[in-house]
Image: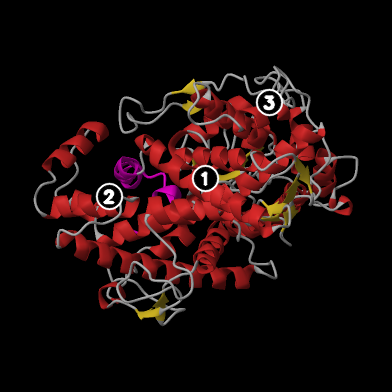
Amino acid sequence: MTHWTDQGLGGRLAALLHAAWHRLRVLLAGRGGPPPTGPEPPSRKPGDTPTPPGFLNAVAEAEQKTPLPPPPPPMPDEDDPKYADDPAAYQRDKQQAEAAASAFAEAAKRRGAAVGAVVSDWLGTAPYVMLQELLDQPRDRMPVFKPAVGPVIVMRHPEVIRCLERTDLFTVDPYAAEMARATDDPSKHPGAYSHFMLGTDNDALYRPDDVLLRRVVARSDGPMLAALAREEAERCTRGARESGTGEIDVVKTLGKFVPLRIVADYLGVPFSESGQPSVLPGLRGGDPFPLDTDLLDVFSFRKIQQGLVPTSDDLYGWVKDAFRNIFNNFNPASPLFQEFRERGLIATEYLSAYIHALIRCYKARLMAGEPVPDTMLTRLLRLQLQVSRGEGETLGQDLAALLGAPLPEGELARRLSDSMVRSNVFGTVVGAVVNPQEATGRMADSMLRLQEGHYRVLNDATYQQAVHWASVAEDTVEYPRSLETLRKYALEALRLQPQGEVLLRRCAKDNTELGVPIRQGTPVFVAYAAAMRDPGVIAEPLAFDITRDERLAEYLADRERHMEAPQSQLYLQHGYGRHKCLGRYASEVTLLESLRALLRLGALERRSPLQMDAQNLYAESLRVGWS
């Protein structure tokens, strides 16, 4: 995981157009594609690619087929002296103005739907061809793509950065409603929060949660994350060797199980294979358990009657179904909308019930002084216990110093309640598998493209050099350099073929922040994939070069993010600004260790294209052989 109005018409129109504009591909969001001037990836069908004359001409054609009438006249003023002696004239003029406004609104609805359909089709079939065409336009004529009616596309680097920085103007509201389904039912728990921080830009809601969560998902966890990711990546490649097939499916092994290992052993939501003991006392993988009465008091279950200890396939399915419903299921007219909504709701309830059961289990062990794993979930529970025992004064003072003001009385306890721990862990877990899996598949595919000669290579950033660095032993002086170099290979590979093209925002109020007027309610597609290839900022953007300046920039370093590493203004795959990925450190480690393990298999060769699902949203397979 926001813009257009003139008070009446704009807001209503935005609501009417919302479904037609959104067959979305997002980050925390979106799905990937190839270099902008190259061919579409093998998973795309050539017949699906729009033919010349190009995206802008397709938009112009859609606009010509949906003409707009003249703007409606202003509504007459009943107190105008000209109506003093002729009230019938006022009624006549009022009816004419209302009819003109209605006709304009209907025409604008048709226009917006037509333009939105063109944008949606090109995002789904030829995103990089479309984005490159927009980047090729003269900057002074098109700083951003903004049709008369329809969604805005922000594609140039400075405007993308500015859009992601101005969370007061361009908000993440489109994701909020479905995210709120993992929070308490306000009819049962009126005082509960109904947000996850990824789905809000309200400072009062966002900032305290941001400080607390970045306290328990920290930069200093790098060694722990590296050990987990390496162990799991090597388990996957060892299994591939032992299978005797001489082949590994990157998406189904490294892409799936390395993130699941992070979810289990770092975030604190483990799985147990069928029949194997689980962390819940007396239960094994696949076992049902009754829904807890404490949870039933605050959370409404409408789809399930009992909880379930998940296997790896269960947990993966829940996360994927919930993610798709929150970030990629916006169009009620889609024939799969109801199915995906239903599966998303079922997944939300199963995952919520399981996380609650884990909270109850670990709280009991903490209260009894028993050891618990060191995870995001248990760190939050330790903070909760500290506050409940009246020992949270130092924590409260730390938060007050970072936020610039003390929290209201009792607010820290509310932020660390079981309900908030449950919903925050839920939101973090949902974003911790699907995007990393997609990124791993895209990165591997991009590295194979490097091997196959698809990219121009600068500064000896060759595939052979990557293989060399992957082979460096841990007990050598070159080892630290090898890891940093492989990290740059992973980021550069993903820059050229990222796990998405756009992030979705909504304009919160009329503004000209991006150089053109954008109305409240307008959907805004923030094309970070295009920004990473903007020739106005990035030299030779289509070449593969691991020596690029990452353009590191601090963000709130003097306040709530004082312990965060600077963020890159070049590599935007993990976002930028307020909504910079909470799991950025885990993600980079996952990519690095997956790449290292893959390259150590031997001389790699592509056995299949990167296969996508039927909706072209999620990677399903990438088979790689070795000799």
Read off the magenta span: 190-216
Identify the residue shown where x is 81% and y is 39%. Answer: 56
Camera-side residue of 332 and 421:
421
Q: For residue 129, which quarter of the picture? A: top right
Is residue 516 magenta-colored? no
Q: Quadrant of the C terminus?
A: top right
Q: For residue 188, which quarter of the picture? A: bottom left
Give the percent coordinates (x, y) of residue 621.
71, 56
Is residue 195 magenta-colored? yes
Identify the residue shown where x is 85% and y is 40%. Answer: 54
Give the percent coordinates (x, y) of residue 408.
17, 46
Q: Secondary structure at mark 1?
A: helix
Task: Name the residue tied to disc 2.
Answer: 379
Q: Secondary structure at mark 2?
A: helix
Camera-side residue of 332 and 354:
354
Task: Name the residue tied to disc 1.
Answer: 81
Q: Earlier in the sequence, mark 3 or mark 2?
A: 2
In the rendered structure, are the residues bearing label 1 and label 3 in contact, judged by CB atoms less than 8 Å apart?
no
Q: Amino acid at mark 1?
A: Pro
Q: Earlier in the sequence, mark 1 or mark 2?
A: 1
